[in-house]
Amino acid sequence: MKTIITNIGLLVNVRDKNFLLRGKELSQLPCIQNAYLIIEDGKIADYGTMSNLPTYNNQLSTINANGATVFPCWCDSHTHLVFAASREEEFVDKIKGLSYADIAAKGGGILNSANKLNAMNEDELFNLALKRLNEVIQLGTGAVEIKSGYGLSVEGELKMLRVIKQLKEKSLIPIKATFLGAHAYPLQYKNDHEAYIKLIVDEMLPNIAKEKLADYIDCFCEQGFFSVDEMKRICEAGAKYNLKPKLHVNQLNSIGGIEAAIELNALSVDHLETMTDDEILKLSNSETIGTLLPTAAYFLRMQYPPARKLIDNNCAVALASDFNPGSSPSGNMNTVVSMSCIQMRMLPEEAINAATINGAYAMELENEVGSITIGKKANLIFTKPISSLAYLPYAFGNNLIDKVMIEGEFV
Ligand code: NIG
Ligand code: FE
């Protein structure tokens, strides 16, 4: 089955070969004006300028893009979109002055979500997550990573990961699963961290591996959560099952997580609101991707990650939504891209690259999604008429998406 899309005003992020973009490379966004695109069996088969449109017979179905700008779908490489309930009561507490740490200390925050998740059955959890997933697909997300971490018990973590496995089977878009048992210490392990780490290493991990439930391992490395040494032990245990780390580090404090993550060959270090110059240098000299989550910093009223400094120092940067009930109750990647330009001074080209091709690398999906490349999935965003690429982040909060296509079909 072949489809040709004609009259594309601007075809964005066209690459015959892709590579992870770092530093200045992020500002190079190759585009074709007045383009056509051919899709075969859900994959990109060819593209070019309308003036070189190949002659084709009528059996090809034709879609006239009528001048729309066409992008590869967003690649959201960091979410927690499986959860039982929203937490707007904490949102109100925060407005009244409580900090993220105050709320966590009260047994709220992650532990609040864990209580609710453990009380919910797998089917109900799955239905809620599928609804969220379909909503973000409508907002242009064409590949996603989803973490566990609201179970914090053997059964709870396995339940969450089984939900993600079901989402993988039923979803239209590629999904990667990350095991985040080390998200917070449950109350009963508050004074016995050793016992909880043992639970992760001796019970959660072997069962997860047996059912092949995870692609990656994560740990919230932070004061009051998991120390650098604890993160190392957990990641080393995960490595025995070939789980590469993608890690929460430097959100609230810089405690040495970046250096350790690089030593652990982490695929990505995520958050980075607090970064020392030395850590920026170490990251730039590594293969590890820095994933920035600006909507979480916004929601928590925190400083934004130093995107400019990271890019100017040659780091590889990706953008993701962090969709979760506590720090980013939105999976809208359009907002993430806008906020990155407005608040972190990323150029529109840099933000679009970071949210597409580099996001794909941060999930090892770079051969499937993230750019207009022959052989990749035709997961595409068609915009409403826009005057230029920069209009997209500029006109924040406006819904500029006209249609979303997944594997060659409009959804
Ligand atoms: O990425 N920082 C740790 N984890 C999540 C928040 C989880 C929650 O508050 O429920 C984050 O921001
Ligand atoms: Fe997160």
Image (cartoon, helix red, strand yellow):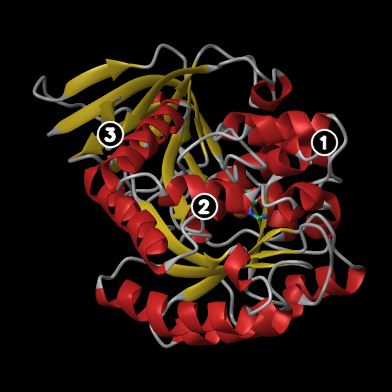
Mark 2 vs mark 3: give the one in front. 2
Residue plotted at (59% across, 74% down): 266
Q: Earlier in the sequence, mark 1 or mark 2?
A: 2
- Say which residue appears at 68% left-offset and 76% top-offset: 191
Disc 2: CA contacts within 10 A as few (<14), some (14-19) or many (>=20): many
CA separation, marks 3 and 1?
37 Å
Q: Nearer the viewer, residue 349 or 57?
A: 349
Q: Circle 2 is placed at which residue position?
A: 114
Q: Which residue is mark 1?
A: 343
The answer to whether residue 268 is seen in the rendering is no
Nearer-N-terminus badge (2/3): 3
Q: Is mark 1 within 8 Å of ligand 1?
A: no
Looking at the picture, how far across and down is residue 121, in whole percent?
Answer: 31, 45
Cα–Cα gap, marks 1 and 2: 32 Å
Residue 87 percent coordinates (x, y): 61, 35
Q: For disc 2, does the CB lie below 8 Å from ligand 1?
A: no
> Which dot, 3 or 1, sits closer to the camera?
1
The amino acid pointed to by label 3 is Ile
Q: Position of 267 compared to 370: left or right?
A: right
Is 150 left or right of 124, judged from the image as shown?
right
Left or right: 298 in relation to 350:
right
